[in-house]
């Protein structure tokens, strides 16, 4: 399969599946337990219909948005995700360059495989740092100071991952970092030698944000131990309020789902929240961000920027979320499969297709700008 033959999310997913060893493909593709929430994330959009307006004189389409003080040329951004150089050796470098080209925001994870500083050099556009809260408060302060010095604009604290989700696909293959594959997993690596050649002929796999705390070999700690031993399951609202004060800039909580939590985020000074269930990878049976969007926007949308992610595969999905009041929409697997398939070229093609779909669909909706998209354009089945 060739990159030019990829025209949508499903094409990129198939190309990634052809290239990646099974354990790594399933790490991206899979979710928690029965994967009910994973499926619901996309199905939720299918329960909502667009009602277009015609003859609106849409000569020019402006799809730009401003979210948490950051201007984006398109209303989608690349959500921070971990371990990207495991999928393709270009990793976050490819995503940063593609986001820069399309004038949108991207994020680097605490478990990112390229440093905040290098990502900042690649893209001068809005950059978020996806942060995990550690038991070591000194480490938290140190990492925030480093992000500020690197020129990161937005701090994005993930609040739905105080413990890892039950991802049974990974258990079946023995997937772990460092690699501890079972026989079935090793066999799947053996039949995809191109990936192994790519992986082992490029620089050593690292986690630059946590170099002195998590090592990929016989060093300090594995990823699973990082989640169970270093992250603080007792993280509470007072801890977050202190972080908001320390950061002193745009601050966002990722993984908020309830109205009460959204109100609390606004009260402690957060600038944004992302309605997210972590791509279905944490609590299976959780509500989808899109299903919860209207309720949260009605409660706090006049006080805080509400975003959502999860299951977004089409420009029409983005328009539905914007019509409900989302300020921007996060993409995850939508760019990870293209990254795995073809590196930077894949991410750029995926973002280009998304931009084209959004512009086309806005024209078909009779919308010259994002402000023209309202709930009048929606009907729920």
Image (tube, rainbow, N blue to C red):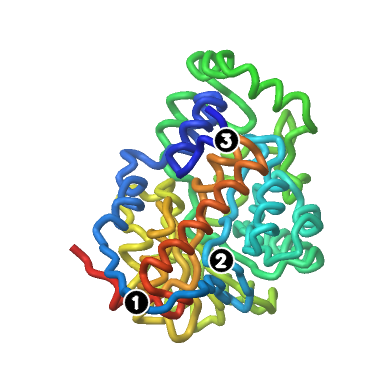
**Separation of disc 3 and disc 2 at Cα?**
23 Å
What residue did someone put label 3 on?
Answer: 3
- Left or right, residue 343 beside residue 319: right
Q: Which of labels 2 and 1 is toward the front? A: 1
Crowding near pointer 2: few (<14 within 10 Å), some, many (20+)? many
Secondary structure at badge 1 equals loop
Q: Residue 302's x, y, as percent?
A: 44, 86
- Whether 218 is drawn above or below 182: the answer is below
The residue sitting at 63% across, 74% down in the picture is 70
Q: Which of labels 3 and 1 is toward the front? A: 1
**Separation of disc 3 and disc 1 at Cα?**
36 Å
Residue 55: numbered disc: 1
- Left or right, residue 272 beside residue 120: left
The residue sitting at 62% across, 36% down in the picture is 342
Q: Sequence order check: which comes first, mark 3 or mark 1?
A: 3
What residue did someone put label 2 on?
Answer: 74
């Amino acid at each position: 399969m060739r990159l030019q033959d990829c025209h949508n999310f499903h094409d990129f997913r198939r190309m990634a599946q052809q290239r990646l060893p099974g354990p790594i493909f399933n790490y991206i593709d899979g979710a928690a337990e029965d994967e009910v929430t994973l499926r619901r994330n996309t199905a939720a959009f299918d329960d909502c219909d667009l009602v277009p307006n015609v003859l609106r004189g849409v000569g020019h389409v402006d799809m730009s948005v401003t979210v948490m003080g950051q201007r984006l040329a398109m209303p989608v951004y690349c959500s921070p995700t971990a371990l990207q150089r495991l999928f393709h050796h270009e990793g976050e470098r490819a995503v940063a360059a593609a986001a820069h080209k399309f004038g949108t925001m991207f994020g680097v994870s605490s478990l990112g495989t390229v440093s905040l500083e290098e990502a900042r050099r690649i893209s001068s556009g809005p950059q978020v740092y996806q942060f995990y809260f550690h038991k070591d408060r000194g480490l938290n302060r140190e990492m925030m100071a480093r992000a500020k010095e690197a020129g990161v604009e937005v701090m994005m604290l993930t609040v739905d991952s105080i413990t890892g989700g039950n991802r049974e696909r990974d258990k079946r293959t023995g997937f772990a970092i460092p690699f501890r594959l079972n026989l079935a997993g090793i066999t799947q690596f053996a039949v995809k030698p191109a990936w192994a050649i790519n992986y082992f002929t490029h620089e050593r796999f690292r986690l630059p944000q946590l170099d002195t705390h998590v090592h990929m070999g016989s060093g300090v700690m594995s990823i699973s131990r990082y989640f169970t031993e270093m992250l603080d399951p007792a993280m509470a609202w007072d801890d977050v309020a202190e972080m908001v004060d320390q950061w002193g800039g745009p601050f966002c909580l990722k993984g908020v789902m309830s109205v009460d939590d959204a109100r609390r985020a606004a009260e402690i000074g957060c600038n944004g929240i992302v309605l997210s269930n972590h791509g279905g990878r944490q609590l299976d049976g959780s509500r989808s961000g899109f299903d919860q969007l209207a309720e949260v926007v009605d409660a706090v949308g006049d006080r805080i920027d509400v975003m959502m992610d999860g299951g977004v595969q089409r420009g029409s999905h983005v328009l539905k979320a914007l019509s409900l009041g989302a300020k921007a929409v996060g993409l995850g697997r939508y760019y990870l499969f293209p990254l795995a398939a073809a590196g930077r070229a894949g991410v750029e093609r995926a973002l280009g297709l998304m931009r084209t779909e959004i512009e086309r669909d806005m024209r078909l909706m009779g919308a010259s700008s994002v402000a023209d998209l309202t709930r009048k354009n929606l009907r729920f089945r």
